[in-house]
């Protein structure tokens, strides 16, 4: 019997090692919502982290994490307000609910119209690759007509700046051997990241007919990055045969580009 007593005593001792800290954790958890100023302090800290991420660190992953943190802190303020209702702290509860709603709506509105894009932060222009610059039509339509009427080439590609950085127009001299669709793919050179993937494929697409030589042109947008943050991009011209055969690449060129700033 003594041995059973020792075993039971040891079991209770070991269980208390795990259970009592669990009770303490529960107490801290409930105290966080029971004392309204805890959630208020939590929000202020998360807001400070959000500002640091937006203005100083400027890295996409950290910024997204800060948004999650500040959203969780707003939710904690709302939960604390519900707890205050049960505690009959009416004024504090009402103030917390109103504050949580105003802050959440303000944050949503701010993020909806936020034009920052952190993609190009930290990217460097490659030094081992020759980069061309998109050309500008300084004389407007006259330059465009001159380009279209220039000496005919097969498989010539020219990239032109449009009215805003990140928006481009391409010109492609081509005599198709079969009916199909010409479209573009773009990749950041140092990381080989696809740029604007499906949107670029759809927006740059041009249907062509067999044997019809002409200069094809289409406008498109690169969304990754911001104005004033150039990076290297590989622009590839692809062809999708109408017959259903596999797509194949016609040519590629490297450019120094910027992303469109919303």
Image (cartoon, rainbow, N blue to C red):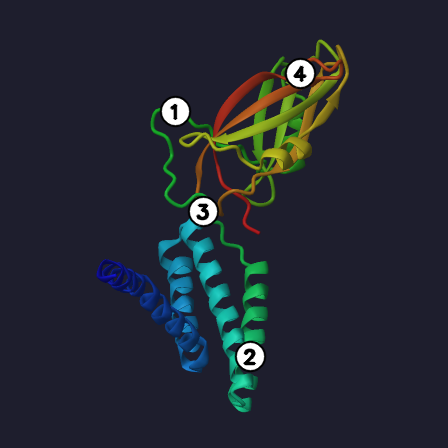
- Of the two numbered discs 4 and 1 on the same chain, state the one appearing first in sequence: 1
Residue of label 3: 228
Asked if marks 4 and 1 touch (Cβ < 8 Å), the reply is no
> Which of the two labelled residues, at mark 3 and mark 4, occupies the earlier sequence position?
4
How much space separates mark 2 and mark 3, taking CA atoms?
Answer: 47 Å
**Secondary structure under the numbered disc 2 in the rendered image:** helix
> Mark 4 or 2 closer to N-term?
2
Q: Provide the secondary structure element on which disc 4 rests.
A: strand
Vertical relation: 237 (above or below) 87: above
The residue singled out by tag 4 in the image is: 174
Look at mark 2 in the image and give the residue it sits on: 82
Foreground disc of the pair 4, 1: 1
Pointer 3 or 1: first along the chain? 1
Q: Position of residue 72 (x, y in %)?
A: 49, 65
Task: Kindly indicate the quadrant of the structure image that contains residue 220.
Answer: top right
Q: Nearer the viewer, residue 215 or 254?
A: 254
Residue shown at 55% from the left, 84% from the top: 86
Give the residue displayed 59% in from the left and 65% down from the top.
Answer: 109
Residue 207, given in percent of the width and then of the height, sits at 75, 23
User: Which residue is denoted by mark 1 in the rendering?
Assistant: 129
In front: label 2 or label 3: 2
Q: Nearer the viewer, residue 48 or 90?
A: 90
């Amino acid at each position: 019997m003594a041995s059973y007593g020792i075993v039971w005593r040891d079991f209770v001792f070991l269980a208390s090692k795990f259970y009592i800290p669990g009770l303490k954790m529960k107490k801290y958890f409930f105290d966080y919502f029971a004392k309204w100023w805890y959630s208020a302090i939590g929000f202020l800290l998360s807001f400070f982290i959000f500002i640091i991420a937006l203005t100083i660190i400027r890295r996409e992953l950290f910024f997204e994490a800060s948004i999650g943190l500040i959203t969780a802190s707003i939710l904690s303020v709302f939960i604390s307000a519900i707890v205050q209702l049960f505690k009959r702290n009416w004024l504090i509860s009402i103030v917390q609910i109103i504050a949580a709603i105003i802050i959440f709506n303000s944050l949503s509105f701010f993020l909806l119209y936020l034009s920052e894009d952190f993609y190009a932060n930290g990217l460097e222009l490659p030094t081992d690759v020759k980069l061309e610059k998109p050309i500008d039509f300084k004389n407007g339509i006259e330059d465009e007509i001159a380009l279209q009427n220039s000496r005919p080439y097969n498989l010539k590609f020219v990239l032109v700046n449009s009215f805003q950085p990140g928006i481009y127009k391409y010109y492609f001299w081509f005599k198709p051997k079969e009916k199909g669709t010409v479209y573009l793919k773009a990749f950041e050179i140092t990381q080989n990241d696809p740029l604007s993937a499906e949107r670029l494929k759809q927006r740059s697409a041009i249907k062509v007919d067999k044997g019809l030589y002409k200069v094809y042109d289409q406008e498109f947008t690169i969304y990754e990055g911001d104005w004033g943050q150039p990076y290297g991009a590989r622009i590839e011209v692809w062809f999708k045969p109408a017959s259903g055969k596999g797509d194949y690449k016609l040519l590629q060129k490297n450019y120094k580009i910027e992303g469109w700033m919303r």
